[in-house]
Amino acid sequence: MFEALRRWRRPAIDEDRWLVLDVEASGLDVRHDRLLAIAAVAVRTAGARPCIDLADSFEVVLRQPGDTAPPDKANILLHGIGVGAQRAGLPLQEALAAFAAFAARSPLLAFHAAFDRGMLRRAWQAAALPPLANPWLDLAPLAAVLHPHEKARSLDEWMARFGIRCAVRHQAAADTLATAELLLKLWPALCVQQPRPRFAATAALAAQQRWVQG
């Protein structure tokens, strides 16, 4: 019995490689809108100071089925993924398998992660693939608990607070980089709570803020 439990136990996460990600979708309704793109970049946390590893990044546009409704023009203007790019993207299963291989055992982070997580969950279900087992961390409540006196709530407000610039807002790769920079800005305050930040303890800290807000 114990051998079976060991086989089914979730693999240990990669504590030294945290993946910050962002998705683009055809709209803001997690239940009905379609996943268009995924971008992610690794943050290396092993050293004295974390750093963004631009060489360890991922970006993919997903091919949209031919029978879907024409893309909304306002939505295209927002994220910049035009009809041609959507038709030339990778097939759903291939794109998701590529991201799963890239993510490996790394924890996943996003700002307002519920949307990103929900869109990925629906895509995995549509592709009939095993769900990702990677743990998640939402940077929005983490920022709030580390800087409780700040009035910032949106990603734009936190970027302004820390002087973070984003090349093209609402473009997955650019938003991912801006979110990763926010994690670096939060790190000194996180180290006050944990001299050597660990993912599980950091996620618990963020969850504490969600509980307080609830």
Image (spheres, rainbow, N blue to C red):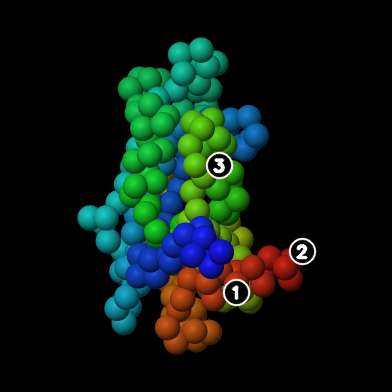
Quadrant assignment, res 91: top left
**Residue 121 shows which numbered tag?**
3
Q: Residues within 10 Å of mark 2 (few under 14, many from 20)?
A: few
Q: Quadrant of the N terminus?
A: bottom right
Is residue 146 shown to the viewer in this render?
yes
* Disc with the residue nearer the chain's start (2 vs 1): 1
**Residue 214 shows which numbered tag?**
2
Is residue 168 shown to the viewer in this render?
no
What SS does tag 2 mark? loop
Per the model, the C-alpha gap separating discs 1 and 3 is: 24 Å
What SS does tag 1 mark? helix
Disc 1: which residue: 205
- Seen at 53% across and 84% down, the residue is 193
In this rendering, position of residue 118 left or right of residue 43: right
> Where does the image place residue 85, in percent across and percent down from the top left?
35, 25
Q: Nearer the viewer, residue 151 or 108?
A: 108
Q: Nearer the viewer, mark 1 or mark 3?
A: 3
- Seen at 46% across and 13% down, the residue is 66
Name the amino acid type tagged 3.
Arg
What SS does tag 3 mark? helix
